[in-house]
Amino acid sequence: MATYELTLNGRRQTVTVDPATPLLWVLRDELKMTGTKYGCGIGACGACTVHVSGVGTRSCVVPISLIADRPIVTIEAIDQDSVGRAVQDAWVSHDVVQCGYCQSGQIMSAVALLKSNRTPTDKNIEESMGGNICRCGTYVRIREAIKMAAQQLA
């Protein structure tokens, strides 16, 4: 066991866990941030995506020991950011959500994309979002919502 000081959604948090514990389980089990979802456990589906130092990160495959003192943002705080708010508003406008399970990861990936590229092409969107799986198949609406958010941010 080891003790870690984390900056989570702008607030300092302390956890004592095994250093090999994936960030996902620290977030969900220790810090009660249950908006981040478990999907596959191998970083392939994107449901567990959070931002670590502003980068979209699959939290199911990153041990807490590698996070160090880098800031973490989860879906619970994404609306505190103008890009996050624009993405969430576009998601609602385009009625993206069906079952909703993948949506926190989809939104976190979309925000990471728009923070690095405010004018993404369809190809940029496909490349950036390609690792996020939606069993309901709302990919067209996701792409349109990202385009709408980009326009709102321009």
Image (tube, rainbow, N blue to C red):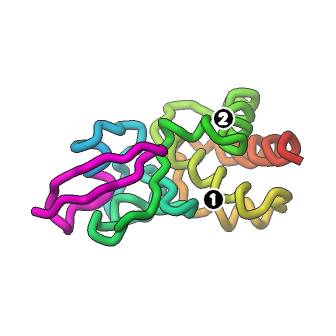
Q: What residue does disc 2 label?
A: 88
Q: What residue does disc 1 label?
A: 129
Q: How many marks?
A: 2
Whole-percent x and y of residue 154? 89, 48
Note whether 146 is above or below 126 in the view shown.
Answer: above
Residue at the image point whose x is 27% and y is 69% from the top: 65
Note whether 98 is above or below 71 in the view shown.
Answer: above
| Residue type at numbered disc 2 | Gln
Q: Is residue 6 magenta?
A: yes
Residue at the image point whose x is 45% and y is 50% from the top: 47
Label 2 SS: helix
Give the number of the mark in front: 2 or 1: 2
In the picture, measured across the screen, residue 144 lies left or right of residue 29, that is right
Q: Which residues are magenta?
A: 1-25
Outermost residue, left direction?
A: 1
Q: Is residue 33 magenta?
A: no
Tell me where residue 42 sits by quadrant: bottom left
In the picture, measured across the screen, residue 146 lies left or right of residue 130, that is right
